[in-house]
């Protein structure tokens, strides 16, 4: 986890140095979207299991701080209440509630479009943590894992202080060795999901205020 922490600190330092030399600008936004599910395969002794996150609506918030013209340091949070199904090689299966949360820091680039001042294509990338919280009738379990998000989209500026934001994002959450990621009724947190990544995709839209 040291590398993600170092990268986050570097982003903050760059933002601070650049912001001191440029006129500051602040954007606060909220959005809703639809986040596709991801999956991972694990094993416990001779048994193998596949955990699948169900696709579901998502929502969250964004804070952007200008570091130079057309570039922002970005903090974001999103959450997806959903369900997770676990299918085991012995024929048994389980289904229970899962909450997926993303805490991210990174950057966003905003591009001018010729002769269209109100439309700004965007591209960004962030790094941070994904939090999986699983619950069933017997137990609950929470695990934090490193993740990255890549984004492409557009800002539609309606006034100088208000606009809409469209976005498509790709998520990758990395599972370390011996990561007992998900729980299930009757088996507890017995399955180790190792050496892989949970991949998810999201499309969404929202609004932002600019100051």
Image (spheres, rainbow, N blue to C red):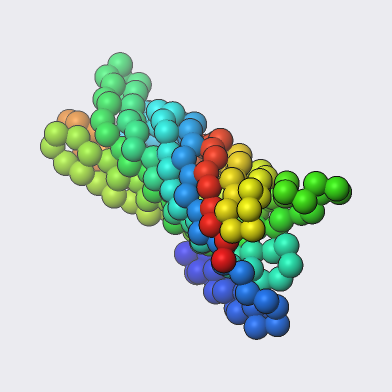
Q: Nearer the viewer, residue 86 or 159?
A: 159
Check the image and name the residue furthest to the left: 138
Q: Is residue 52 above or below residue 177?
A: above
Kindly identify the residue that appears in the image at 54 percent across and 40 percent down. Answer: 205
Residue at the (71%, 71%) spot, across then down: 68
Is residue 14 found left or right of 63 in the rendered image? right
The x, y position of residue 187, in whole percent, is 21, 33
Which percent across, then down, holds residue 57?
A: 42, 33
Q: Quadrant of residue 88?
A: top left
Q: Can you name the residue that lies furthest to the front here?
A: 159
Q: Give how far across and how far down residue 87 sits, in percent.
A: 34, 23
Kindly identify the residue that appears in the image at 77 percent across and 51 percent down. Answer: 117
- Residue 116 shows up from this direction: yes
- Can residue 197 be seen here? The reply is no
Residue 14 against residue 174 in the figure, above or below: below
Q: Residue at x 54, y 38 (%)?
A: 204
Of residues 204 and 9, the one drawn nearer to the viewer in this rendering: 204
With 203 as the anchor, is 50 left or right in this view?
left
Residue 11, placed above or below residue 20: above
Going by the picture, which residue comes out furthest to the top?
Answer: 91
Q: How many marks?
A: 0
> Can you give x and y, in whole percent of width and height, for residue 124 in the image?
65, 53
Quarter of the rendering occupied by the C terminus: bottom right
In the image, taking residue 181 as reference, residue 137 lies left or right, namely left
211 and 143: which is toward the camera? 211
């Amino acid at each position: 986890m040291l590398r993600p922490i170092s990268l986050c600190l570097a982003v903050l330092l760059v933002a601070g140095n650049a912001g001191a030399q440029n006129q500051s600008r602040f954007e606060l936004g909220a959005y809703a979207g639809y986040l596709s599910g991801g999956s991972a395969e694990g094993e416990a002794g001779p048994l193998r299991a596949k955990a699948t996150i169900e696709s579901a609506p998502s929502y969250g918030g964004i804070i952007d701080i200008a570091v130079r013209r057309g570039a922002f340091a970005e903090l974001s949070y999103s959450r997806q209440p959903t369900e997770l199904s676990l299918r085991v090689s012995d024929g048994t299966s389980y289904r229970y509630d899962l909450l997926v949360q993303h805490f991210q820091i990174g950057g966003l680039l905003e591009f001018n479009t010729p002769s269209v001042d109100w439309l700004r294509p965007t591209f960004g990338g962030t790094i941070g943590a994904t939090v999986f919280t699983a619950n069933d009738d017997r137990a609950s379990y929470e695990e934090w894992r490193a993740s990255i998000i890549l984004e492409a989209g557009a800002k539609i500026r309606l006034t100088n202080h208000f606009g809409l934001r469209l976005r498509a994002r790709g998520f990758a959450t990395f599972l370390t060795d011996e990561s007992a990621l998900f729980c299930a009724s009757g088996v507890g947190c017995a399955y180790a999901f190792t050496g892989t990544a949970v991949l998810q995709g999201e499309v969404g839209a929202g609004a932002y205020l600019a100051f």
